[in-house]
Image (cartoon, rainbow, N blue to C red):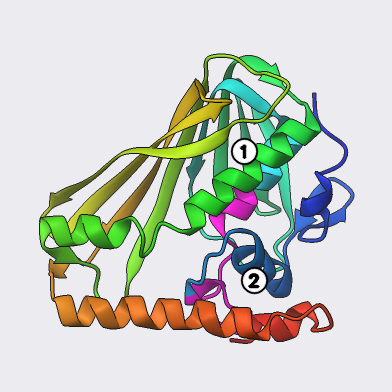
Amino acid sequence: MISEKSPMFLQQFINRQGETVQFSREQACRFAKEVATDFNPIHDADSKRFCVPGDLLFAHMVAQHGLAAQLECSFAGMVSADVALRSVAQDDQWLLKDNADKNYLILRQQGALFHEAAYIEALVQDYVRFSGQNFPHILQPLMQQHQVMINPQRPLVIYERMSLQFDHFGSEAPTLQLADCQLQVEGKRGLAILGFELNTAGERVGRGEKRMILSNLQPYDHQVMQQMVDFYNGRKQQFSARLRPSVKGEQLCGI
């Protein structure tokens, strides 16, 4: 079963043309900042290294194809602006490909499927907000604990994959609560695993995790790391100060 429409909040961030979808720089930028509260410069509309947020791709695919009792989303490549993408079914998974057949994302579904639009919209928004706030709130303490840090000159954090497991679906969408987090370091490479629980009315109804690869690690420097945190938080404050109902999306993204 494929949903013909995205949840209302997603429609403003997606351009549909027949069987394909595209994401403009302005749409991706607005999603990152307004929905995910993610202020990574790589999602700025005017960034030379621009790419569409992985969480926007995930949100689109889940809205299109539904949740599953066991779901895993793996990222295979970065999507540039205005690339026409289509979903291709393959066994128990959906592939997000461009017209040259290049794959960017794999959505695996196992077990019972669930397509309730309001439930999916609420869950996706909560997950995206959680996912977008990984730095500095979660990653910085983990890096300090292991006395390593990403390279401030070229910070490289790759969103590898995320997964969800549901004990059952209900009428009310669950909220995310951070659980176990860890950073596995091997040389200049690190794997951050952020675990979380899915709760409804105080009851755990599922669990999940997000995995990110940290490359070019170097010894932890408190002063340099604080500068990175201050820069990131400064961008967030600057955006909040500019956010007015009358301001156009493309102006908001030109930070």
Q: Nearer the viewer, residue 106 or 31?
A: 31
Q: Secondary structure at mark 2?
A: helix
Q: Farthest residue in the front direction?
A: 202
Residue 153 seen anywhere in this rendered image of the structure? no
45 falls in the magenta region: yes
2 falls in the magenta region: no
Task: Kindly identify the residue that appears in the image at 69 percent across and 82 percent down.
Answer: 252
Residue 237 seen anywhere in this rendered image of the structure? yes
The stretch in magenta equals: 41-58
User: Is 8 left or right of 142, judged from the image as shown?
Assistant: right
Q: Earlier in the sequence, mark 2 or mark 1?
A: 2
Observer-side mark, 2 or 1, equals 2
Quarter of the figure with the C terminus: bottom right
Q: Which mark is residue 72?
A: none
* Residue indicated by mark 1: 95
Identify whether 93 is placed above or below 23.
above
Q: Disc 1 residue type? A: Leu
* Residue indicated by mark 2: 29
- Please identify the quarter of the rendering in which residue 50 is found: bottom right
Identify whether 21 is placed above or below 208.
below
- Please identify the quarter of the rendering in which residue 81 is found: bottom right
CA separation, marks 2 and 1? 24 Å
**Position in image of residue 88 (x %, y %):** 69, 36
